[in-house]
Image: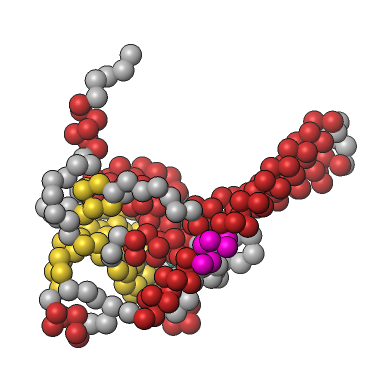
């Protein structure tokens, strides 16, 4: 528990620092992007300067993407928790996820039956799914499989005594598995650290899993990771069962809205 608290405090201070820097940096980047765009307009086609300016523009754009990610990570976003059916939330993301992972990777969806309700902001579920699926995609060299699964599960005190990292109670789990490269013990130990990445300069930001971790903690859940080098990885997230009626049911809501003209 102390380690968890320490991690949470560290995340918060890094978040605050990163948010402040990212905000100022974003303003500077807007200036660079704006003036590069202006310069590009003045340079005639075929001028070798064009190439250089395009490179400046692309680099500044990439920096802006990173600062945006930092801002989402740091910002205490206004969240609107709702009692929801996780299956409905996952289903509404499947199309986007398929686009995100590309055509060479097969996405399998295994919804659990009669899921208990959970209380959280559905956009946080979207964020978790996007981050986990992008990581799964990147772990797969060319062709492979990603599976998303949900289900209900209960742990009693006895089980939790025997299994570190579990909490007693009723939970709804969300699991994302891949048959990609997997992780060694040294990598596994660091994956939730902000800015930890093995993807190399210009590719990873190391904020994906830190963000996922933050969201899960904010919702009183916990994460378990199973990974085997060369075989694949499963991220399994547990959210506490909520009481109350499901208020977020997108298909039903959609039916209520009359067709626009
Ligand atoms: P980023 O994706 O920018 O590197 P993340 O925080 O999302 O940042 O991930 C941190 C690191 O965890 C990755 O660089 C990678 O080494 C490892 N990782 C995360 N998910 C997986 C996965 N599904 N398979 C293998 N390695 C993974």
Residue 147, x across and y down, in percent? 31, 59
For the question of whether residue 58 can be seen, the reply is no
Name the outermost residue toward the top.
261
Would you say 132 lies left or right of 153 here?
right
User: Is 84 drawn above or below residue 192 in the view shown?
Assistant: above
On whether residue 78 falls in the magenta region, the answer is no
Residue 50, x across and y down, in percent? 82, 40
User: Is 104 drawn above or below residue 200 in the view shown?
Assistant: above
Residue 107, x across and y down, in percent? 34, 53
Which residue is at a point 44% across and 64% down the rendered structure image? 209
- In which quarter of the view is residue 170 placed? bottom left
Residue 100, x across and y down, in percent? 45, 48
What is the magenta range? Answer: 13-18
Which residue is at a point 36% across and 52% down the rendered structure image? 124
Question: Taken as a whole, is the magenta stretch helix, strand or loop?
Answer: helix
Would you say 70 lies left or right of 155 here?
right
Which residue is at a point 20% across and 26% down the rendered structure image? 256
Would you say 11 lies left or right of 93 here?
right
Q: Nearer the viewer, residue 213 or 11?
A: 11
User: Is 211 drawn above or below residue 81 in the view shown?
Assistant: below
Q: Nearer the viewer, residue 108 or 240?
A: 240
Q: Nearer the viewer, residue 208 or 105?
A: 208
Which residue is at a point 40% across and 63% down the rendered structure image? 214
């Amino acid at each position: 528990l102390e380690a968890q608290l320490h991690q949470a405090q560290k995340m918060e201070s890094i978040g605050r620092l990163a948010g402040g820097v990212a905000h100022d940096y974003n303003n500077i980047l807007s200036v660079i992007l704006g003036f590069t765009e202006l310069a590009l307009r003045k340079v005639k086609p075929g001028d070798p300067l064009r190439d250089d300016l395009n490179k400046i523009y692309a680099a500044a754009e990439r920096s802006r993407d990173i600062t945006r990610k930092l801002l989402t990570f740091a910002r205490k976003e206004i969240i609107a928790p709702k009692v929801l059916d996780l299956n409905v939330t996952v289903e509404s993301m499947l199309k986007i996820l398929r686009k995100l992972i590309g055509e060479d990777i097969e996405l399998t969806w295994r919804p659990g039956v009669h899921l208990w309700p959970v209380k959280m902001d559905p956009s946080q579920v979207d964020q978790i799914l996007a981050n986990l699926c992008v990581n799964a995609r990147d772990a797969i060299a060319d062709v492979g499989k990603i599976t998303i699964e949900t289900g209900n599960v209960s742990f009693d005190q006895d089980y939790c005594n025997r299994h570190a990292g579990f909490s007693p109670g009723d939970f709804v789990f969300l699991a994302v598995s891949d048959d990609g490269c997997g992780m060694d013990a040294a990598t596994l130990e660091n994956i939730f650290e902000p800015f930890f990445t093995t993807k190399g300069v210009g590719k990873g930001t190391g904020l994906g899993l830190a963000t996922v971790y933050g969201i899960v903690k904010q919702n009183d859940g916990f994460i378990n990771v199973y990974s085997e080098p060369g075989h694949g990885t499963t991220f399994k997230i547990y959210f506490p069962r909520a009481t109350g009626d499901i208020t977020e049911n997108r298909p039903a809501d959609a039916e209520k809205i009359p067709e626009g003209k």
